[in-house]
Image (cartoon, rainbow, N blue to C red):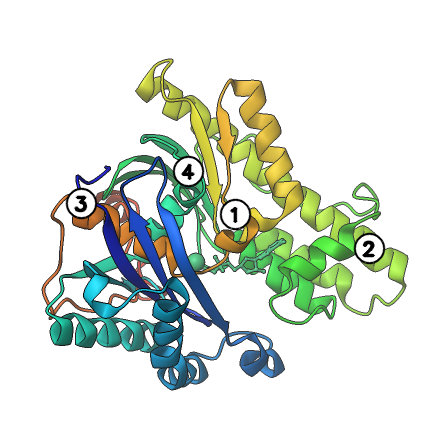
Amino acid sequence: MTPSAPLTVLGLESSCDETAAAVVRLGGGDCAEILSNVVFSQIAAHAPYGGVVPEIAARAHVEVIDEVARRALAEASVGTSDLDAIAATAGPGLVGGVMVGLAFGKAMALALDLPLIAVNHLEGHAVSARLARPIPYPFLLLLVSGGHCQLLDVAGVGASKRLGSTIDDAAGEAFDKIGATLGLGYPAGPALERLAEGGDPGRFELPRSLLGRAGCDFSFSGLKTAAARLAAGMSAETDRRDLAAAVQAEIVRQLVDRTDRAVTVYAAAHGGADRRLVVAGGVAANRAVRSGLSELAGRQGFSFDSPPLELCTDNAAMIALAGAERLALGLTDPLDVPARPRWPLDEAAARLRPTHLAGRKGAKA
Ligand code: KG4
Ligand code: ZN
């Protein structure tokens, strides 16, 4: 994947509530180099509504994307003539926002006569750990964020096989919705982690979803409903702490249990080689999640990697790297490439076994 000459790529990310731009250089070292990584968070604009409002998000992206991109170039001390390509998230995500970043990227590519790379946001998360350490392909990936929860056998660029996926909510969604009923604002994941510190995870009994069930799929909706019921009307600090600890422990238990099964499937496909586990996505910022998976990896003889905390949540450095890896293989996209609100990484698996049936949400992950 290391190109013969270094490639410098501007990445753009606007699929949810972060407007981000970054410059990454691939080649010339073991690892890609992040020259700049600018993230403008819209959290304050959405906080009063307790979640991301798509229309507000799209407008906020329009207002700042040019300034965010300008800052990314300035902080990298890079001029537009130093760029080899523009990489922009083309989905999956909130389509109004995706269109803003993608249209901006197309305009830059056209004006500067540069190649455009339409990046799948999930592929960005998949390569994010490679921004910090030279992790070779293939690896087993647990991608766990606010919108996604899946296990993937990542063989290389554009070659991921889905081993399991959530059949209802994503883990981050469970953290956010349960956290909201505990009055923790939005997004509630980091606040719930802090509240859980020192709590007793054994005091409240929560449903142990999919315990002992075959396969590598996830389910968090039962946990969400049960925890929300317990949280309603709860005011004592010790009660809230103990419930937060129980919720976090149950989410970690399920992530570890399902990943353990995927380890077996992955190991059967790869033999004794390439025993690498990577966790990425916003929920990978959670220390209990990281330590549960790191312990599992150790037990199974796998190495364990996770991006640094600031690269777990949405950013454009991961989009720039995914774009640079594609560019190194000559994979670019035409200027009429569409924005895709739903765009599974493993399209064949998503068609065969849709996790969200058409008519409800489509094949989300
Ligand atoms: O990857 P990301 O920024 O956006 C998506 O692509 O979804 O992930 C955001 C999600 C939110 O649900 C947020 O609550 C969760 O990641 N999150 C955490 C933590 N930090 C972020 N969840 C649990 N513990 C954390 N420390
Ligand atoms: Zn994301």
List the residue tagged with mark 3. 328
Which quadrant of the figure contains the N terminus?
A: top left
The residue type indicated by label 2 comes to: Arg
Earlier residue among tags 1 and 4: 4
Left or right? Give the position of 130 relative to 305.
Answer: left
Q: Residue at x 63, y 59 (%)?
A: 189
Q: Badge 2: few (under 14), some or many (20 or more) residues near its Cα, within 10 Å? A: many
Mark 1 vs mark 3: give the one in front: 3
Q: Amino acid at mark 1?
A: Ser
Residue 85 marker:
none
Name the residue carrying label 2. 241
Q: CA distance from mark 2 to mark 3?
A: 49 Å
Viewer can see residue 155: yes
Q: What is the secondary structure assignment of the residue under circle 1?
A: loop
Residue assigned mark 1: 219
Of labels 2 and 1, earlier in sequence is: 1
Q: CA distance from mark 3 to mark 4?
A: 22 Å
Q: Nearer the viewer, residue 240 or 122?
A: 122
Q: Residues within 10 Å of mark 4 (few under 14, many from 20)?
A: many
Q: Nearer the viewer, mark 3 or mark 4?
A: 3
State the residue lying farthest toward the top: 272
> Tag 3 or tag 2, which sits nearer the N-term?
2
Q: Could you tell me if residue 347 is visible in this image? A: no
Residue named by callout 4: 141
Horizontal side of 321 relative to 236 (left or right) equals left
Query: Mark 1 near mark 3, Cβ–Cβ under 8 Å?
Result: no
Q: On the picture, is 30 further left or further right than 144? A: left
Q: Which residue is situated farthest in the front direction here?
A: 77
Of badges 1 and 4, the one in the foreground is 4
Q: Residue at x 26, y 36 (%)?
A: 156
Mark 3 neighbour class, 10 Å CA radius: few under 14, some 14 to 19, many 20 or more: some
